Amino acid sequence: MTKSPRKFFEPLATGAPAPYRELPVRVERMIHFVPPHLEKVRAKIGEMIPKSDVILGNLEDGIPADAKQAARKGFIEMGLAHDFGSTGLWTRVNCLNSPWLLDDVTEIVGAIGQKLDVIMLPKVEGPWDIHYFDQLLAQLEARHGVTRPILIHAILETAEGVKNVEEIALASPRMHGMSLGPADLAASRAMKTTRIGGGHP
């Protein structure tokens, strides 16, 4: 499942930027999740940028199905409208088997790929998910003249993903990091969860 060392740092598409051999070091103490379909929230982005380490346009959980396209469009508008400087610009796209993922990635990379630092990919289950996404990003970077690699932050939300954590971590030089999604992980294992102020309802 792993690439040979010689191939690991080769671009996956002709014209795509060379993968990082060492990830850029940035301050990421706080990630500010933004629902980009809400215009009143987008209007505050200029004030939030100098106060945040990362601005993340959330397209996945918390965005209703009938607002997915508006969220994608709003995130692109955010990216075009502002200079983020040293503040990271991230997005959390919809999961790979959703009807929105392909449009999320193709439209965002096409419009603001040069500004985008990291894509959070939900419900990663194995290195195969990263390999697919890695190849797709390389093709889009090449098509749109993006000159630095967009990194991948994997969210592990299933038992399968946790089981394959080491392989996921080593799947690509694009790997920025990983997070656990405790609610979805608990659901995938039929686990009871607790909440502040009491037990599971």
Image (spheres, grey):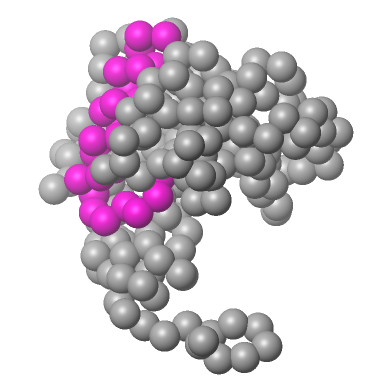
**Where residue 125 sits in the image (x, y, percent)?**
26, 56
**Where residue 136 sits in the image (x, y, percent)?**
29, 26
**Where residue 159 sits in the image (x, y, percent)?**
28, 69
Question: Could one spot residue 35 in this view of the protein?
Answer: yes
Q: Which residues are magenta?
A: 120-144
Q: Is 196 situated left or right of 177 in this image? A: right
Q: Is 161 situated left or right of 85 in this image? A: left
Q: Residue at x 37, y 33 (%)?
A: 100
Question: Could one spot residue 22 in this view of the protein?
Answer: no
Q: In this view, which residue lies farthest toward the front?
A: 66
Q: In this view, which residue lies farthest toward the bottom?
A: 199
Q: Within the magenta stretch, is there residue 38?
A: no
Q: Residue at x 45, y 41 (%)?
A: 65
Q: Quadrant of residue 112?
A: top right
Q: Is 75 situated left or right of 44 in this image? A: left
Q: Is residue 162 above or below residue 117?
A: below
Q: Residue at x 16, y 39 (%)?
A: 4
Q: Is residue 38 above or below residue 164?
A: above
**Where residue 143 sits in the image (x, y, percent)?**
35, 9
Q: Main secondary structure of the magenta part?
A: helix
Q: Is 190 situated left or right of 6 in this image? A: right
Q: Nearer the viewer, residue 137 or 86?
A: 137
Q: Residue at x 20, y 45 (%)?
A: 128
